[in-house]
Image (cartoon, rainbow, N blue to C red):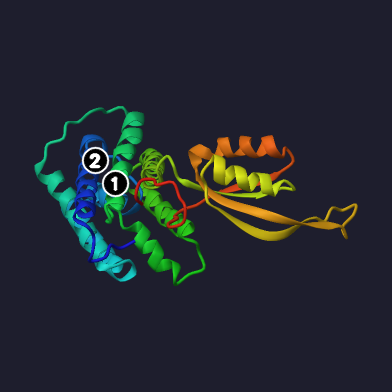
C-alpha cells in the first residue's frame, strides 16, 4: 500500500532502513551465490539473470531496464511513492552489483539454490516492508489480473513456467530445476518476512456455551470479539429442529491459536471452531505486530 505525504519521520527512517537492508540482502544473494554459479530465479530477477547468462549483458543494467515498465505500472496501480521506492531499490541493487565486493561463499549447487534464494527472498521481503519492490512481477500480475479471468497466483505461476522453460531450452534443464528450487525458497522467505511469525488468524466459534466463550475471550485473552446471530442444528435426523446461537468471531495471532483452542475446549469440547489466515487487519482491538 502506498504511503501518504504525511508519513512521520520515524516511519520514513524505518522504511529507509528496510530498503537498504533489502538491497544489501538481495545483492548478497545474487553476487555471492546465484551469479557466480550461473543460477537463475523466477520473476523479473530470474528474467534478468537469464538475459545476463544468454547474452552476457551487465546484470545491473538489465535489472534497471527490465523494471522500468513495471515501475511505471506500479505508479499507476499502487502509487507514486511505491514507484519512487522501487526505483531506488532497483538502482541500489544495480550499484551494489557493480561497485560492492561480495565474496563467493559456496559452489555447492544445493547450498547455492537454498541460500541464494533465501537472501534474495529476504531482500525482496524487506524492500516490500519498506514500501517498494525489487521484483515487479507482482505488479505485472496485478495489471494482468484486470484483463483476464486468472488469479494473481495463476498469473505468476504461468510467467515463471515460461521463464523456467526458456532456461531449460537455452541452458540446461538442470539449471531450470535448480531455478525452481531457488524461486520456491525465495518466495517462501518473502512471504515469511512480509507476514511475520505473528500473522493474524481469524477464528469463528459456534457453541451452545457462547456466553462463557465470549467472556473467556474478552476477559482472559483480552481479545475483541464480533458476534453474529445465527442458528445451529439442522441435522439429517431432525432437520426441522434448530436453536438460536451466537456465532463468535475474533482475530488473534498465529501464536495464540493453540491457547484459544484449549480455552474453548475446556468450556465446550463439542464447540465447532475453524480458522483462516487474515492477510491484513487494522483498527479494533488487535495485538500490535510488525508493520505490513
Residue drawn at the location 28% of the way across and 56% of the way down? 131
The image shows residue 200 at horizontal and vertical percentages of 48, 47
Residue 216: give x, y in percent of width and height.
60, 42
Is residue 208 left or right of 155 when viewed as pictured? right
- Are circles 1 and 2 on residues that touch, CB within 8 Å? yes
User: How far from the left and from the top, in percent, is residue 199?
Assistant: 45, 45
Residue sitting nearer the eye, 238 or 48: 238
The answer to which of 85 and 116 lies nearer the viewer is: 85
Q: Position of residue 98 (x, y in %)?
A: 11, 45
Q: What is the quadrant of the N terminus in the image?
A: bottom left
Of the residues under marks 1 and 2, which one precedes in the sequence? 2
Q: SS of the residue at dot 2?
A: helix
* Residue marked by disc 1: 126
Drawn side of residue 131 relative to residue 243, left or right = left
Q: Disc 1 and disc 2: Cα gap in Å?
A: 9 Å
Mark 1 surroundings within 10 Å by alpha-carbon count, few (fewer than 14), some (14 through 19), many (20 or more): many
User: Could one spot residue 27 in this view of the protein?
Assistant: yes
In this rendering, which labeled residue sits more in front, label 1 or label 2? Answer: 1
- The residue indicated by pointer 2 is 25
In the image as oriented, which residue stretches furthest toward the right?
Answer: 237
The front one of 36 and 218 is: 218
In front here: 174 or 198? 198
Q: Which mark is residue 66?
A: none
Q: Residue at x 58, y 39 (%)?
A: 260
Name the outermost residue toward the left.
Answer: 99
The residue shown at (20%, 59%) is 87
> Is residue 58 visible in the rendered structure shown here?
no
Amino acid at each position: 500500500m502506498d504511503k501518504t505525504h504525511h508519513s512521520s519521520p520515524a516511519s520514513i527512517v524505518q522504511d529507509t532502513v528496510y530498503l537498504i537492508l533489502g538491497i544489501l540482502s538481495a545483492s548478497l544473494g545474487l553476487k555471492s551465490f546465484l551469479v557466480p554459479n550461473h543460477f537463475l530465479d523466477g520473476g523479473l530477477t530470474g528474467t534478468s539473470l537469464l538475459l545476463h547468462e544468454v547474452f552476457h549483458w551487465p546484470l545491473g543494467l538489465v535489472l534497471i531496464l527490465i523494471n522500468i515498465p513495471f515501475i511505471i505500472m506500479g505508479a499507476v496501480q499502487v502509487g507514486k511513492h511505491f514507484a519512487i521506492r522501487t526505483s531506488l531499490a532497483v538502482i541500489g541493487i544495480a550499484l551494489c552489483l557493480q561497485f560492492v565486493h561480495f565474496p563467493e561463499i559456496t559452489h555447492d549447487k544445493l547450498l547455492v539454490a537454498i541460500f541464494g534464494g533465501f537472501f534474495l527472498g529476504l531482500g525482496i521481503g524487506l524492500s516490500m516492508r519498506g514500501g517498494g519492490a525489487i521484483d515487479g512481477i507482482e505488479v505485472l500480475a496485478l495489471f494482468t489480473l484486470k484483463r483476464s479471468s486468472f488469479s494473481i497466483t495463476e498469473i505468476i505461476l504461468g510467467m515463471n513456467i515460461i521463464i523456467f522453460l526458456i532456461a531449460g531450452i537455452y541452458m540446461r534443464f538442470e539449471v531450470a530445476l535448480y531455478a525452481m528450487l531457488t524461486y520456491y525458497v525465495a518466495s517462501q522467505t518473502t512471504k515469511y518476512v512480509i507476514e511475520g511469525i505473528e500473522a493474524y488468524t481469524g477464528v469463528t466459534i459456534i457453541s451452545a456455551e457462547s456466553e462463557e466463550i465470549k467472556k473467556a475471550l474478552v476477559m482472559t485473552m483480552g481479545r475483541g470479539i464480533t458476534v453474529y446471530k445465527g442458528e445451529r442444528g439442522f441435522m439429517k435426523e431432525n432437520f426441522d429442529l434448530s436453536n438460536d446461537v451466537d456465532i463468535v468471531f475474533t482475530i488473534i495471532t498465529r501464536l495464540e491459536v493453540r491457547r484459544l483452542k484449549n480455552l474453548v475446549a475446556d468450556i465446550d469440547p463439542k464447540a465447532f471452531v475453524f480458522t483462516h489466515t487474515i492477510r491484513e487487519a487494522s483498527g479494533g482491538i488487535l495485538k500490535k505486530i510488525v508493520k505490513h
